[in-house]
Structures are given as structure tokens and as C-alpha cells.
Image (cartoon, coloured by chain):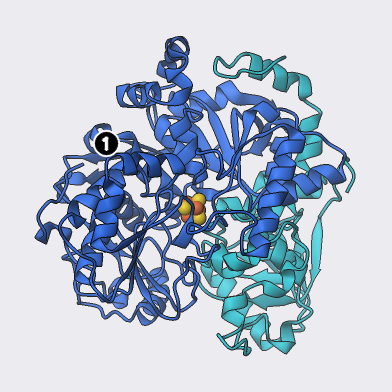
Chain colours: A blue, B cyan
Amino acid sequence: MSSGTLYDKVWERHAVAELPTGQTQLFVGLHLIHEVTSPQAFGMLGERDLEVAYPELTHATVDHIVPTEDQSRPFVDEAAEEMMAALERNAERAGIQLADPTSGRQGIVHVIGPEEGLTQPGMTIVCGDSHTSTHGAFGALAFGIGTSQIRDVLATQCVAMEKQDVRRITVTGELEAGVEAKDVILQIIRTLGTDGGVGYVYEYGGPVVDALDMPGRMSICNMTIEGGARAGYVNPDETTVDFLAETDRFREDPDRLETLRPYWESVRSDPNASYDDVVEIDGDALEPMVTWGTTPGQGVGITEPIPDPDDLPADKRESARDAQVHMRVEPGETMEGYEIDVAFLGSCTNARLPDLRRAAAILEGRTVHPEVRALAVPGSQRVKAAAEAEGLDEIFTAAGFEWRGAGCSMCLGMNPDQLEGDEACASSSNRNFVGRQGSKDGRTVLMNPQMVAAAAVRGHVTDVRTLSEVTTV
Amino acid sequence: MSDGPAEPVREVRGTGIPVRGNDIDTDQIIPARFMKVVTFDGLGEFAFFDQRFDEHDEQQDHPFNDERFQGANVLVVNANFGCGSSREHAPQALQRWGIDAIIGESFASIFAGNCLALGIPTVTTDEETVTELQDRIEARPDAEIAVDVENEIITVDGETITVTVDDAQRRALVEGVWDTTALMRANTDAVRDVAANLPYVEVDP
Ligand code: SF4
């Protein structure tokens, strides 16, 4: 059993009661909702004649189904319009704040929570979306929940959960130019497996994590769920506090930041905290990672050969074989030169301002390969505005990227942005599952944003370090 | 549904359906495009849709299309089933298709939690036992299977296999306390106390 970790401390502060099931009833400090997983929960609430218990602690936005081209209402897609209308109705009736596309604050739920200062250290945060783990970057305990649990939270501001074990992951060394947080987490998932985190919460630390900015830490925590762990976090430090100080919430009320600071510091893992497991990852040895398969754990460094399924552990062989057929790759080759049709720069993993900046640095003065369709989809309306303020949109469009409105877009293909047929896509998102980007024959190669930009230019997966202007994070 | 205790789920009886493969994610169980709905009704027919139909909507080989398994209610799967997206649409689709219990090597934790919220047991056992069970169902689709949640035993055609049911899940199902909304609503005062003790929570008491 772990003790003295941030997880233990935040858990204890939020535990309400032990339930007859043996689970803990845990108070939820921040509940985020979006249009896909919440309407059914409001429906269940209505069936029981229950009200939303703490509407001021729930915040809503729309991200999965919003078109990123023309966001005027009603949306062209009737089903999307119906979901949007249901969210508006539910939010209004319950008195829940909604960041809709007219607000200037709309965006992917895991981008807007942090940028508004809603996400804070020592909180419990839930959302009906598995990538809620992203918010752990601030030292919050944040996890995805299902729709019945959304009903629970709406009705009681609590979730029923079992305590997990804590695995400390220390990333040592320093990242070389072209290598980013995304590569760190892809390496972690490849090392520990897509189910290696089942039953665990991950604590990320060490020199590489300490040196990352908040967006980088968010990229790591974001993909915790791809490693099978339900939540991951980084202990809050001055980088965290500096980021929060710049958000609306604390700019308007700087005293509040000082009031909360002692609490934030108190939840940090103790120096002598004990963990259920400890893992070390060598950051010096990392190179830009790319996936060759159809799970995020099927990744290699860009100069490394794709593994032979026969050399993998027995339980990984069959899925590796299927994945190599689907992706049309051969063991022994590297991913360098793998032709792409689409470049997608977006998602809650990598569509924040620094991600866009690094990609733009690669694209400046270059053009997208004529055979490639390239999309840049900022994570939120604010990210978009900030990028435009520094002229990034011009760099993207001059290079041949489409510059879109904020949303999930081609990360999961619930809006019109989808792969067609067997198109291959260099993607900065988090899931390369078959069918994920809207076409079941589509082929997704996950990589960091600089690598997406480089692939867009060359028309194939390529080592960004062989281009100039590579950025160190 | 009333705001009262749920029905106990002590045992599930019926016949089996094997779906083989590790890391079957919720995008495969219910593709995202079928989630553009505001209720869960009607999701059953889209379970495993992209594995069951090709691009011309022609049926492909898949257990969910197989005549022999049409009345089945016990799904038998391999490792890390239900990974990926947290969508409750996945167990909802399976339940609406007819699944009442799932036996597997391991389950993604959000998926298992979502199943519990619907009263679907997710029972685990080792790889060899799962494979054997899948082979057996293939060979005799009408073999009767009983999943005894309370005693952690599966019976197939009279033969018993020991399985594991997570403690909290077993208690919740057997005692009929898997309706967590009702359970937690009983502690409203304690919730208020916890909130009042958290420096960051700003609500009117
Ligand atoms: S960007 Fe992708 S992973 Fe993130 S919330 Fe949207 S659909 Fe989910």
C-alpha cells in the first residue's frame, strides 16, 4: 500500500464514506461535461426526479461533434445539432456554465479546464471522458467516468471508487531536440504495456518531467489511460503555480492564489512517500517515437526497426501480426518513408499553443507535400486566438495546412473531419485504434507535433531531426 | 427506475459467445459514429459493427453475426477487454444486444466500472481457462453456462471452473447495492462536511 503520496493525501481529503460495497464515496471538486456522454445521464436523473446537487461545480463545453469548419447554427449535421441542443437545454435548466462556440472559450474539455484555471492542484476532477487524466498534470486526481457515474456526480457530487496502487515513474536525463513529452509517454506505454497500468495510478516525476512546461506535462498525463492506468499526475511545483497565475481565474483574483498555495504545497508527495511500484525511464536514450501498429503501445523510435511479432511476448504476437497487416508494414523496416495522405495536428494531447509553435517552426518557409491533406485544429478558441495573435495561422496556411476551428476533429471522426478509405495519417492525437479516425481501413501513425509537420512536408513519416529548426522542449 | 436499491445479481445463466483477441477497445465495441445520439436506445444492433459488416454493409464473419450465438448472453473475451474510450455506450450496446455477463482474462477498469453500473458482472480467469472455454462454446454453442457471482464459480455443462470476481463488484451485485446514486444520496450531510473542509471549494453551504 502506498502512503504519503499525492494520491493518498488527495484521496483522504475527499473521502466521504465507506459504501456497503467496500468502495469509497469520493467528493468531486470539479465535474466537466461534454455533449456525447452527458445527455443520457441527465435523462437518468430526470427519470428519478433528481436535481443537480452542486451545479456551480460542473462546467460544460462542446468538443466531440462540433464542426471545425463552419460552426454556425444549426449545425449541418442534424444529429450533431440535436446533441448540442440537448447540452444547452440541460446546462441551462440545471444552472451549469456552458462554454459554447459563441463564448470565445469553447474547446476540447481537457484544454479549456486548465486554461481557464478551473483545474487546480489537490482537486478531484472527473469527466465522462477517459482523457480526463490530462488534468493530473496540475497535481489533481483526475479520472474518466462512465455515464452512470456522471448521473451519480450530478445527483450527489460524488463517485464511488476503489483505491488503486501507485506507481512512481521517474524519467531521468534530458530530452534531445526533436524529442517531446509525447515521446516520453509513448515510450512508457511501450515499456509497461497498454494494460500495464490496470489497477494503478501513475505518478510522473524526475528531471525530464520537472523541466517540462505545463502543456508538456499534460501530454504525458493525457495518455496515461492508453497505458491502462486510470489517472496519472505530476506533483505541483512553481511551474504549475506560474501557469495558474496567468489564467483568468487567478489573474482576476491574485490573493486567491496565495490563499490556496499552502494547500497545493501540502498535497505534494512526501520525500519519503512509499509506492507500490517504481519504474525508471531513461530520457537521454529517447528519440522521436512513431507507432507502427494499432495500439499506442506498438511504437518504436524513428530509427528503430519494427519488431518481428515472433520476437514479442506470446500474448502480444497475434495483435502485432494483425496490426502489421492492417498498417502494411514489415518487421525489420523502420517507419521512415511510410507514405501518408493526411497530416492531423490537433487533439487534447497536442493542440496547445507550444505544440502549434513547434510545428510552425518546422513549417516556416516550407510547403506541405502536394499529395498530403493537412489540418491544424487548435485545442480551444483561446489557443486559436493566441496562435493568430502571433501569426502562426499565417505560417500554417502559407505552408498549405487548413487552419480550423477548435474541437476534437479527426482525433475520433465524430464530426465531418474523417479519414477516407485506407488513407494513412500522421497524427498528433492519442489513439491509433482501427477505425478511430472515422474509416475502418484508415491507418493512423501517432507522433509528436514536430514530427507531424515534418511528415506533412515530406509526404512520408520522417525523422524531424533531419530537418533544421527542430525545437527543444 | 426508482431511486431505491438495485436488483441483486447473484447468478447469470444462459449460453456463451466467444469474441477472441486482446486489447479490444471500446471504439471496436461501438464505433464513435453511432454515439451521435442522446439516448442509449437502439445501440444493440451496432455492437461490433465495423467487425460485423464491410463497407457495403455486407455481413462478415463475426460471432455476433453467427446464427449459433444469437440467443447467447455470456460473452467470453481475452485480455484488456474494453480499453480505450470511457464510453458507457460500449457496455450499453452489449447489454442491449443481449449480454448479461462477461468472462475474460482482464478488463480495462473504466469498462468494468461501467458494466457494474449496469449490473453486468465482469468475471476473470487465466488465459488457458478462457481459451478452453471459448473453444468449448465454439464446439457446443448450446452448452449451458452458469456464472455464479456469489461463489465465484462458472458451471459449463455440469463442470465447474473457479473464477475471480472483484470484491467490491461481488458485494455490489450480490447484495443489490450497485446503484451507487441511491447509496451515496444517503450521505448528503457528510458530503457537505467534506466540501466545507476543502479550501478550494466555493459553494454556498
Ligand atoms: S481530442 Fe480526442 S481524445 Fe481528446 S477528448 Fe477529443 S476525442 Fe477524446
Where on the picture, by quarter, is residue B11? Answer: bottom right
Q: Secondary structure at mark 1?
A: loop
In percent of width and height, residue A282 lies at: 20, 46
Residue A287 is at least partly visible in this image? no
Q: Nearer the viewer, residue A259 or A104?
A: A104
Q: Nearer the viewer, residue B142 or A88?
A: A88
Residue A350 shown left or right of residue B10 in the figure: left
Q: Nearer the viewer, residue A116 or A170?
A: A116
In percent of width and height, residue A183 lies at: 27, 52
The residue identified by callout 1 is A212
**Relative to A233, is A448 above or below?**
below
Three-letter code, disc 1: Leu
What residue sits 42% from the left and 53% below the top? A347
Residue A352 is at least partly visible in this image? yes
What residue sits 49% from the left and 71% below the top? A435
* Quadrant of the frame with the C terminus of chain A: top left
Q: Chain of mark 1?
A: A
In percent of width and height, residue A16 lies at: 67, 24
Where on the picture, by quarter, is residue B41? Answer: bottom right
Q: Count residues near mark 1 (Cα–Cα under 10 Å), then give few for <14, some for 14-19, many for 20+.
A: some
Where on the picture, by quarter, is residue B56? Answer: bottom right
What residue sits 50% from the left and 70% below the top? A438
